[in-house]
Image: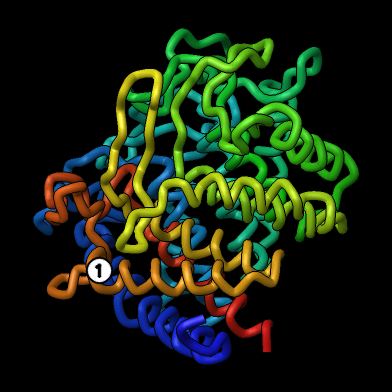
Amino acid sequence: MHRDAGMLMTEMRAGAMEELIRNIMPYWIKNMPDRDGDGFYGRIDGRENVVAEAPRGAILNARILWSFPAAWVKVRDPLYMEMATRARDYIFRHFFDDAYGGTYWSLKSNGEPLETKKQIYSQAFFIYALSAYHMATGDMESLDRAVSLFRLIEKHSFDRERDGYFEAFTREWGELADLRLSEKEANEKKTMNTHLHLLEAYTSLYKIWPDGELRRQLSGLVRIFTERIVDPATSHLNLFFDEEWNCRSTIVSYGHDIEASWLLCEAAEALGEAESTKGVALKIASAAHEGLAEDGSLWYERDDAAGHFDRDRHWWVQSEGVVGFLNAWQLSGDESWLELAAGLFEYIRTRLVDPENGEWFWSIRADGTVNRDDDKAGFWKCPYHNSRMCLEMLARCSEQF
C-alpha cells in the first residue's frame, strides 16, 4: 500500500462528510424547491438554468425523499427533515393513484398526472424512499404506503410460473406494449435494473417490517441474481431478458456490476445470511474492475457485439464504484480494493464535483471535457447515488477501527 489503511479511512471519512454537508445536500436545498408552489422543480439543466415547466419524474422525487431522511439520520440537520417532509407530502398528494393504486411515472409541473403507467422500477423506489422516511421518523403512513406498494407489486408483477418480475403496466395494471424506462432500453419483459432496485427496496422495507412473505421474496431476488442475472462465464450482469429468462443483451454495464456487488451483500445481511453472497459479490466486483481507467475512474459500458465502448465517466457509476470497492475490501481483506476506492473518490472530488455551483456534473466525457449538455438535476440526476456514497463511506470507514 502507498498509504496506511487507517490514514486512508480517516481521509475518506472526513472527505465524505464534507462532500455531503458542504456540497451535495446544500445544492438541493438551495436550488430545487419550487419557489412558487409545492414540491421540487423537475429540472435544472447542465448550465444551471431552472426549467420550472419541466415534468416531475417519479424517480427524482422518490430519490429526493430517500436522500434527505437517510442523511438526517447521520447529520441531524433540521433542514434535511424539512426537505424530506416536503418531498413526502408532495408525493402523497400527487404521485399516488387513489383510483387504481400504485404511483404515476411522471407529473406535469402543476402536479397533475402526466404519464400514468405503473413502472415497477419506480414503485420500488417509492418503497425505498418511504422506508427511509419511516426509519428516520417512525411515520406510520409512510410504512403503510410502502407495504401497500409491496403488495401491489406481488399481486401484479411477480411471475409465479417462471420467477421474477415483469417491467411495467398500464395505469389500471393491464398489459403495456412499451415497457422501457427510457428510449435507449431494450423493450423486454424482465430486466436486471428493475430486479436490482426491487432488491434494494425490499431490503430496506424488510429492516423495518420483517414480514414472512417479504422475506421469501427478498430471498428469491437474491437467488435470481446469483442463478439467472449474473453471467456464470464472466460474472458481469446480463441486462435484459424475455419472460422465459433468455438473455436479450450483450451490454456490460460497469456501474450496475459494482452496484449489484454490494447491494446483494446488503440483502443477504438483512436476511441473516451474509456469507451466502460473499463469493459472488467479489466475482462481480472483479468483473466491474475491468472497466477501470488509468486515472482511477470507471468507464460507463461496453458492447463487444456492437463494437461499442462508452468511456464517459458518469456521476452515478463513480459513486457506486467507491461503495463497491469498499465492500470488496471489507469482504476480502485485500487493501488494494481500499486503494481503488480512495483513488476513485479523489477522481470524483477533483473532476466531477462542480467547484463553482456545487453538486456534480453529469459526466466527464471520454476526451476529458466536462459534460454540460446533460442535466445537473432532473428526471435521472438526483441526490441519491452520491449522497448514499457519502453515507456508506462514513459507515464503512468507521466500523473498521
Measured as percent of width and height from the top left, residue 362 is found at 25, 52
Tally the numbered discs: 1
Q: Secondary structure beneath disc 1?
A: loop
| Type of amino acid at the residue the image marks with label 1 | Val
Q: Tell me where residue 39 sits by quadrant.
A: bottom left
Residue farthest to the right, as pictured? 212
Q: 83 above or below 266?
A: below
- Toward the viewer: 67 or 98? 67
Residue 151: x percent and y percent?
Answer: 74, 34
Residue depicted at 45% across the width and 38% down the height? 253
Q: Is residue 76 visible?
A: no
Q: Quadrant of residue 108?
A: top left
Query: Where the C terminus falls, by quadrant?
Result: bottom right
Instruction: Classify 10 Å Cα crowding around label 1: few (below 14), some (14-19), many (20 and above).
Output: many
Does residue 114 appear anywhere in the picture?
A: yes
Q: Residue at x 44, y 67 (%)?
A: 387
On screen, residue 117 versus residue 167, left or right, reads left
Residue 38 lies left or right of residue 216; in this view the side is: left
Q: Position of residue 10 (x, y in %)?
A: 51, 90
In this rendering, the answer to whether 32 lies above or below 244 is: below
Q: How is the image coloured?
A: rainbow
Q: What residue do we see at 67% from left, 43% from top?
A: 199
Would you name the residue on which mark 1 appears? 353
Residue 80, how many percent across, how many down? 44, 74
Tell me the residue at 31%/34% (across/down). 309
